[in-house]
Image (cartoon, helix red, strand yellow):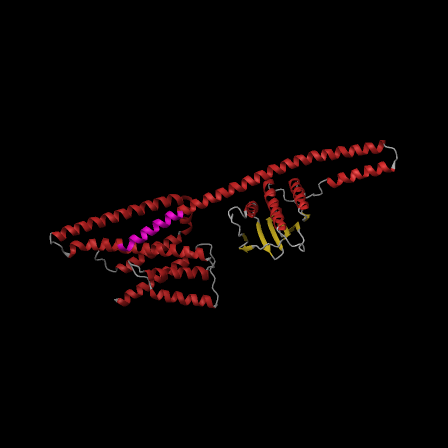
């Protein structure tokens, strides 16, 4: 009999791990196995864990840790999931499996005291529930996404009601036992149901409470994240709106200046036609014309707003002794909205100017170089600038040691947000004295 139970316990652990592999294959995670040391060692560890098995209806701390370790090793080794997410997945999957399996076991125990093959039936029902849930994973996932807050509320309410009911039933049974003890009329069959029910509470109550807490913490964490994302989005939109209005004002100003230039040229032509042939007057007028030409906007990117942005940023670069080089042809990107043009190029150049201004070594040239090209159906924008400050770059994200980490990187996030509309991508490359941002935007 002991041997039969041992095989069922081992089978329970094998099903627990096998169903997890099935679940991961239903998601977007990619399985990978190589004949390398870490893969072989992980496989051996999983085999050892399987031989230890999972008990039915009860669970020791050691058993929970084995289950958690098995899922954690699978996530880290075979699916390359980061540590934080691996821990979360391991906790949630292990606890749900324990709770479902224990609930089924004690439900069968309480409902049918003399049920034959209790463990076998428990194992089969548990397998069917998990197999069906994983098979309809995408349908359940869609329901969760659309109704997740309702599910949180319903699940929390049901579990709390069950908890209250269990406590009340246990209290009532204990009261009855006390009364019978006083009357010296205690028989085994009178209290056996109560003892089984008390055992049910003992084995399932901790998991119920833990699941309730996890749900409440999840709701609270999601609410904080949503509020934080909302605040960040509002900040970015306000900044973009201010930039856009500013550049529209500058555009209007430059249009007026063009009219002045046009009138001035007409005046020069009239003066030349009426003047006496004095070389000094010719030289004076030529100097005026040269001065007018030098003040004209030298940028011609094919986009008026972009010309204005470069014109304004070039002034900031001149004030900070930064060499500003532009080689941008934006004439074939009419599909990019003006607010996104402002977001992409203003933030790229502002970040580059900030990096150049931090250079305290006179031997390092301060420069910003912007150029564009078309490569395999993509419009590619490359912004390169000099620097000497240290940057922590991880997973294409910039990390800072600044105290105000919330607003740092808003510029980069704003760029990513804008290019995401066009299925674009931002890649960052950092070296000791050079920083390169490359944007890829698909074009027809």
At horizontal 51% and vertical 42% (from top left) the residue drawn is 233
Spot occupied by residue 111 in the image (x, y as percentages of width and height) = 23, 53
Magenta stretch, residue numbers: 202-218
The reply to whether residue 380 is visible in this rendering is no
The image quadrant of residue 276 is top right
Q: Left or right: 236 with respect to 5? A: right
At horizontal 43% and vertical 65% (from top left) the residue drawn is 42
Q: Left or right: 218 with respect to 433? A: left
Spot occupied by residue 57 in the image (x, y as percentages of width and height) = 28, 58
The image quadrant of residue 152 is top left
At horizontal 48% and vertical 66% (from top left) the residue drawn is 34
The reply to whether residue 200 is visible in this rendering is yes
Is residue 231 part of the magenta span, yes or no? no
Q: Between 278 and 268, which is closer to the camera in this rendering?
A: 278
Magenta stretch: helix, strand or loop mostly: helix
Total numbered badges shown on the rendered structure = 0
User: Which corner quadrant holds the N terminus?
Assistant: bottom left
Spot occupied by residue 257 in the image (x, y as percentages of width and height) = 71, 35
Q: Left or right: 272 with respect to 435? A: right
Is residue 217 part of the magenta span, yes or no? yes
Spot occupied by residue 2 in the image (x, y as percentages of width and height) = 26, 67
At horizontal 59% and vertical 45% (from top left) the residue drawn is 347
Q: Between 14 and 203, which is closer to the camera in this rendering?
A: 203
Q: Between 438 and 124, which is closer to the camera in this rendering?
A: 438
């Amino acid at each position: 009999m002991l041997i039969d139970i041992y095989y069922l316990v081992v089978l329970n652990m094998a099903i627990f791990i096998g169903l997890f592999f099935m679940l991961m294959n239903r998601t977007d995670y990619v399985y990978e196995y190589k004949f390398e040391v870490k893969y072989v060692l992980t496989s051996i560890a999983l085999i050892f864990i399987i031989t230890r098995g999972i008990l039915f209806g009860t669970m020791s701390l050691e058993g929970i840790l084995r289950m958690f370790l098995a899922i954690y090793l699978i996530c880290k080794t075979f699916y390359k999931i980061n540590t934080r997410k691996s821990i979360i997945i391991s906790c949630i999957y292990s606890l749900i499996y324990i709770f479902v399996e224990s609930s089924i076991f004690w439900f069968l125990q309480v409902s049918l005291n003399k049920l034959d093959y209790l463990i076998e039936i428990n194992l089969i029902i548990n397998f069917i529930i998990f197999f069906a849930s994983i098979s309809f994973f995408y349908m359940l996932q869609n329901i969760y996404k659309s109704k997740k807050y309702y599910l949180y509320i319903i699940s929390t309410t049901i579990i709390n009601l069950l908890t209250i009911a269990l406590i009340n039933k246990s209290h009532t049974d204990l009261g009855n036992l006390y009364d019978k003890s006083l009357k010296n009329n205690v028989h085994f069959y009178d209290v056996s149901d109560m003892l089984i029910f008390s055992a049910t509470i003992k084995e399932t109550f901790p998991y119920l409470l833990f699941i309730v807490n996890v749900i409440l913490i999840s709701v609270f964490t999601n609410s904080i994240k949503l509020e934080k994302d909302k605040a960040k989005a509002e900040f970015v939109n306000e900044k973009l709106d201010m930039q856009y209005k500013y550049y529209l004002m500058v555009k209007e100003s430059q249009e007026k200046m063009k009219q002045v230039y046009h009138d001035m040229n007409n005046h020069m032509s009239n003066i030349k036609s009426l003047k006496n042939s004095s070389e000094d007057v010719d030289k004076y007028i030529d100097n005026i014309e040269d001065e007018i030409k030098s003040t004209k906007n030298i940028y011609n990117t094919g986009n008026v707003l972009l010309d204005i942005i470069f014109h304004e940023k070039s002034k900031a670069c001149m004030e900070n002794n930064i060499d500003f080089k532009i080689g941008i042809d934006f004439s074939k990107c009419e599909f990019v909205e003006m607010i996104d043009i402002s977001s992409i190029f203003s933030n790229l150049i502002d970040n580059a100017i900030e990096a150049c201004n931090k250079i305290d070594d006179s031997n390092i040239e301060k420069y910003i170089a912007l150029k564009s090209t078309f490569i395999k159906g993509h419009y590619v924008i490359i912004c390169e600038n000099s620097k000497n400050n240290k940057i922590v770059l991880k997973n294409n994200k910039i990390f800072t040691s600044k105290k105000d980490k919330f607003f740092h990187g808003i510029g980069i996030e704003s760029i990513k947000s804008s290019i995401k509309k066009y299925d674009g991508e931002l890649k960052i490359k950092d070296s000791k004295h050079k920083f390169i941002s490359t944007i890829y935007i698909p074009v027809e």
